[in-house]
Image: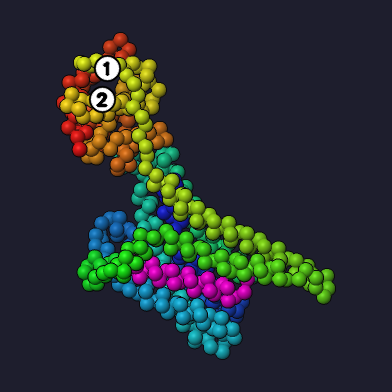
Amino acid sequence: MLEQFITALPGVLGPALLVMAYGVLLAAGQGRNRPRSASWRTWGLVLGLLAALVFAALRATVVINRRTMVNFPTLVACVLVDLLALGLVVCAGRLTKDWQHHRAALNLANAVAGLSIALTVFRALPDVILQLTDFVEPGAPIFTSAMLLRALGFVLGVAAAILIAAIFRSLRTTCPQDAFSLATFLLVALLLIQHGTGLLAIMQTTGSMVLHGWSFRVFIFLFNTNNWLVMAQALVFLIPAVASLVAGFRMPLAGVDASESRKHRAFRRSALVSFLCSLLAIVSVLVTLTFGVAQAHKKPVLSPPESYSLTDSAATIKFSQVDDGHLHRFEYKAKDGTVMRFIIIKKNGGAYGIGLDACENCGPAGYFERDGQIVCKKCDVVINLATIGYKGGCNPIPFDYTTKAGKIVIQTADLDALSSVFKA
């Protein structure tokens, strides 16, 4: 669930903020008096979503296995449109003021904004959409608690991005327009950096451009700090948030009459609420993309080995020690000095799943227990309990054992024969 949330949120947040910011800066007229070109931004969003869905579907079905042929031209277009969008943001205030006198200029601005939205959405959303293919584990039933949790994390990530954009939009009524314009300018600049870095990565890979020295170090830094760029996209809206708070405190509580005094007090309350909500939204993004990412990517630690009875010829473990349905890990030092591990877990049918704490695919990485499931530490594959004790795939490597008098008996010779699995 957390993995899906921390992937969906940064993927959707940039486009959501861009759509919101253009909607605020290019707002002109009301109802029928709005310019028709305002709908072009909506069409840009729709076209971007459709293109992202198609591209994600083609990638999922491996119809497109060389993404460069699509990514390169779209990234070039993104960079060029981002540069135009920076100029659009600077001129937005003049374009919307008395827009009937320069209708063509505002139409051009809405066209650039629509194209900017379409390209940004197309670039950001395919990776988010492809998460849908990971909801169900291979071979597992469709409707499981794990699938529902992954779906919930995805939905919450998308909803959180949209909600954060809506919170920042509330600042439009209480902060000066210059502060909102500055935040939008910085937002577009950050998107330009993201798109430019992606373009440079393709050019480096194809050999059409080779960076050296400080330029290469800057490129690598930007390439590896995508989450920090996303956090910065939210952080720039601290500018209008603070400006809103200042404007609220500067508003005198007393007016020329009681009606105006009520309006002033309402403005101050609105400014304070908008500031606090925006601050909470920014903090939530920072926490999600730092602490949340760290938690999701935290490497599991193998549980310590348990004690058991060991003689020169056999290892003996009592049923009572391993009959709780949880994973139990044991350590054994082979005759050649290799330190080995093996695991035992009681399966649903009452049988015991026994094997090395290693598999043929991932080697001696080991297994850990997560939410009642046995998971390979290296590849994060969930192991079917019923198949533990059988060869193949990511299953623990099995070995012979016997049971008698309420005990599991493993011959040390059988373990010694498998010591090579744990050798470096």
Earlier sequence position, callout 2 versus callout 1: 1
Kindly identify the residue that appears in the image at 59 percent across and 86 percent down: 98
Q: Position of residue 84 (x, y in %)?
A: 42, 79
Start-end of magenta stretch = 175-199
What is the secondary structure assignment of the residue under circle 1? strand
Q: Residue placed farthest to the bottom in the image?
A: 101
Kindly identify the residue that appears in the image at 59 percent across and 75 percent down: 177
Q: Quadrant of residue 253?
A: bottom right
Q: Position of residue 419 (x, y in %)?
A: 19, 29
Give the CA separation, mark 2 to mark 1: 9 Å
Asked if 365 appears above or below 399 in the picture, the reply is below
Tag of residue 329: none
Q: Residues within 10 Å of mark 2 (few under 14, many from 20)?
A: some
Q: Position of residue 113 (x, y in %)?
A: 46, 75
Kindly identify the residue that appears in the image at 53 percent across and 80 percent down: 92
List the residue tagged with mark 2. 332
Q: Position of residue 259 (x, y in %)?
A: 80, 71
> Is the Cβ of the residue at disc 2 closer than 8 Å to that at disc 1?
yes
Could you tell me the amino acid type at mark 2?
A: Tyr
Q: Residue placed farthest to the top in the image?
A: 405
What is the secondary structure assignment of the residue under circle 2? strand
Tag of residue 310: 1
Could you tell me the amino acid type at mark 1?
A: Leu
